[in-house]
Image: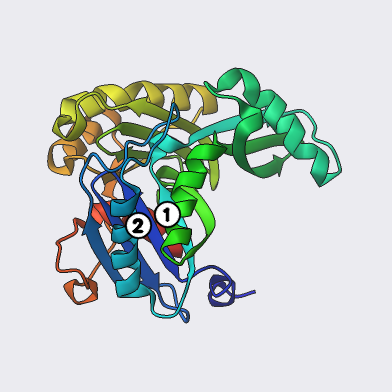
Amino acid sequence: MERTQQYRLRPRLGCEITIGGVISARASDKMDRLELFTLRKLDYEAITPGLGGPNVHDGEALRAAISGAMGAVGGSSKDVIVVVPDAAVRVLLLDFDALPAKSQDVEPMIRFRLKKSLPFDVEQAAVSYDIRRDNGAIRVVAAVSPRAIMEEYESAFRDAGYSPGVIVPSSLATLGLVNGERPTLLLKVDPLNITIAGAQNHELRLIRNLENPHGTHVTAAELADAVLPSIVFFEDTFAAQIEQICIGGAAVLEELGPMLHEQTGAEIRELAPDLSPDQNLGGERIDPSMMAGVVGALLG
């Protein structure tokens, strides 16, 4: 099946919730390109992404931002891919020797494995997963979050008249822009989190989510210190040198890129989709690097 035919099966609309705003975009139904995008700002107090309690503190403001952003790009479409903050979801890699043959028996086994790794009750959590099999090895990428937290985000879209059929954390959405055939590291930075993901042969090999205590004032040196242990771990564990580092979000590429290249020798690439100002319907300027999540979700 051709890629364009596959692409029509997914929603044309994507919307990312961040602590500072709501970013929405519409993709073409004929080819892999973005047609329109826009931003509606949110007060920083409106949401506080996390796993330990309620995320949405001003539901009315969030719904208004969603309505404004989606209304600008959505047309008559109502199905949307929702990209939520990384802090609201825990992503884990699990290795299994075997999994049950029946699909209905797989999720209970995955939930059992997750119990000791999570700070919340896995039985009251929303769990999605992807299974990869390679030469007898079984690896599961599991995304899990308290069901009540996911319901907060879903309800905001449903109340605004949209159907959140797909929900994905920002880092996994951003990986849609990364060609992970050769050893590649993704570094995605937001005011709450530093997410580090490693890929090789189109397989996710490593993912770590670190707290960002410096917020928007995080320096290049602090980011380099955060990412280097993961590079060492990846190269030691998989006997492969990182060849490419892709950087997205609120990272200072001008300083961080040369620093990481000097320390690792890797090619440094910014995850900043090529966008035209004519596609921006909101008037608010959007840094292209902040579009990586929603574009990766739609076109990856």
Residue at point 73%, 38% (across, down): 107
Residue 115, placed above or below residue 265: above
Marks 2 and 1: CB-CB under 8 Å? yes
- Locate residue 122, reporting x and y percent: 62, 28
**Disc number placed over residue 63 in the picture, else none:** 2
Local crowd size for mark 1, using a 10 Å CA cut-off: few (<14), some (14–19), many (≥20): many
Instruction: Give the CA distance from mark 2 to mark 1.
Output: 5 Å
Colour scheme of this structure image?
A: rainbow
Nearer the observer, 60 or 108: 60
Residue 15: in sight, yes or no? yes
Q: Secondary structure at mark 1?
A: helix
- Quarter of image, res 128: top right
Tell me the number on the disc at residue 156: 1
Q: Position of residue 26 (x, y in %)?
A: 38, 71
The percent coordinates of residue 27 (x first, y second) are 40, 72
Q: Amino acid at mark 2?
A: Arg
**Residue type, numbered disc 1:** Ala
The image quadrant where one finds the N terminus is: bottom right
Q: Position of residue 119 (x, y in %)?
A: 52, 21
Residue 150 is left or right of residue 275, and the answer is: right
Along the line of sight, the residue nearer the viewer: 180 or 89: 89
Residue at the outermost front position:
60
